[in-house]
Image: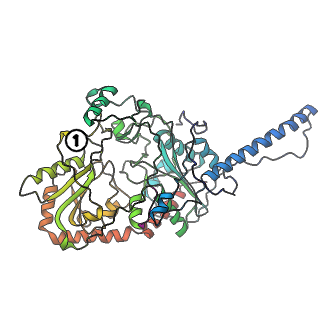
Amino acid sequence: MSSNSSISNKSKSTSSNSSTRKKSKSASPGSSTTRKKSKTSSPGSSTTRKKSKTSSPDSSTTDKKSKTMSSHIISKYDLSDFDLSYDDIDSCKRAHKLPFMTDPAEFISLLPKKLILKKSVNESNSPKELKFDIYQKLERKDIVNTFNYLFHHIRMGIFVYIKNNKLHYFIPFQNLNYKNNWSSTIKFKKNMTFDEYFKEKEKYLRKKDEGLEKDTTKWSSNNCLIGNWTDNDVGDMGWYEVREMISRACTNHTVNDCIFFINRRDHPVLTPDRMEPYFHIFNNLTTPLSHHNYDKYVPIMSFSKNKNFADLLIPNYADWRNVTRRLYPTSCIDMEKDSINYDWEKKLAKAIFRGSATGCGTTPEDNQRIRLAELSKELSKNPKTKDLMDAGLVGKNLRDKKFMGKEIDFFRFRDYDLQYSQRKSMNDQSNYKYIIHIDGHVSAYRLGKELSLGSTILKVDSLFDYKMWFSNHLISGKHYLRIKKDLSDLEKAVKWCKSNDKKCKTISQNAKKMYDVIMTERYIVSYFAWMMNSISSNYII
């Protein structure tokens, strides 16, 4: 089923092109096919011949304009003058933001009309997601449809084209004129009106939100997180790291021609049965897509997912930063200045957690981090349990959220009288024997780093069973200790750890060994090459 909104409809949006770049000398891969010019006149009348003569210059002018426009667009997204990463802070801060696309008409101009993908590598062990019907026998139209889906329905994404073993295009895009299909279904806490809810929120927070978007059809979402601000700023988190991973894969491996998309949201965006992906917004995962519901899609890569989604898991930007120890323009500061404490005997026999109140819920009942902070507070009051853990929130996270089956609300932090803690870097947390790992609104990307700290990870089961690219490598009881979703066994687990010091030390060592195997540039780059070659096999062009 196609959508009413088509990429062929020219957008009025503008796109970013603030930095100076080297002009591409290559011809446009998206230029129209060459028209055969007739060497003889038509056997028709002289009037016909006159029309032919007068229309020829117009046709030539149109072709030239088309080629000029196409060349301009190609030059605009040429990244040859952009470094992949940086060694020093000053160079990093001087870096220009990568160009991004806001006009969908440009996508058609860039995509070759006759697309042929060269394939020399056959992967025998492809990701199981590539067996889904939506990913079979892919053609050019499926690429266009997937762009339409991400641009118009999700709002954003990244287009990636590998050609001749090189990263040909890496183009982030965002719909600045986005309209959602769910604004009429959402409700506010206590069935309040729009004005009542935000008036109460301003009173509670004791400040006014000047950037609130009052037209709810313009709101976007990241599953449970509501994007309801007027600012149309285009965030670039993770662009540079992912681009470098892909570039290195092409440099170090033979990679087939292929095209895919990267999800810029934390939450996965595509189900194998074409349902609305944001189950918190729709209160289920069984609502068929109402817009851009196509039979097939090009593979979409994401950083986190569960078994209900078709997204392909890839290493996240936090893992790549930890591995390379280089600087990237989204954050040109190395946060880990402290050294890691690997001496088990010098670690404090106590469980540590630091993090903001991220998560889809706004109460201890539906937000694991808020529940953890409450539990730590209660244990600290009892002399027998006060030394078990130091779990504190470092931020309130006051965004409007929509939890499945509930109305929109925010974290009413004053209702819980929680103490907020000082931040601790991940390396600083290595001074504790036990580290509590708990999801945010999807998988917490810090898990890869935590494996390296030489401490025992107490991993709380994900509320919605989210996983990351390396999750299947981890075994409960060997690389971490498993904690129930409701945290009901956390106190008991910490007490067990204190009574089984040698076993916990072994678990921490196993985690570090696993980190040393999978968290290397070589392993991650090989993983990406495998993923891209696997995707290419699903194309029939």
Q: In the image, what residue occupies the spot 32% across and 47% down?
A: 441
Name the side, left or right, on which 504 lies relative to 13: left
Per the image, label 1 sits on a secondary structure element best described as: helix
Residue 450 sits inside the magenta stretch: no
Name the side, left or right, on which 370 lies relative to 216: left
- Residue closer to the observer: 425 or 465: 425
- Magenta: main secondary structure equals loop
Residue wearing tag 1: 413
Image quarter (top left, top right, bottom left or bottom right) of the C terminus: bottom right
**Residue 106 placed where, x, y %?**
61, 44
Q: Amino acid at mark 1?
A: Phe
- Residue closer to the observer: 351 or 392: 392
- Residue closer to the observer: 489 or 2: 489
**Residue 230 placed where, x, y %?**
43, 36
**Residue 303 placed where, x, y %?**
40, 54
Task: Examine the rendered structure and indicate whether residue 438 appears above or below residue 54.
Answer: below
Q: Look at the image and give the residue range highlighted in magenta.
A: 324-329
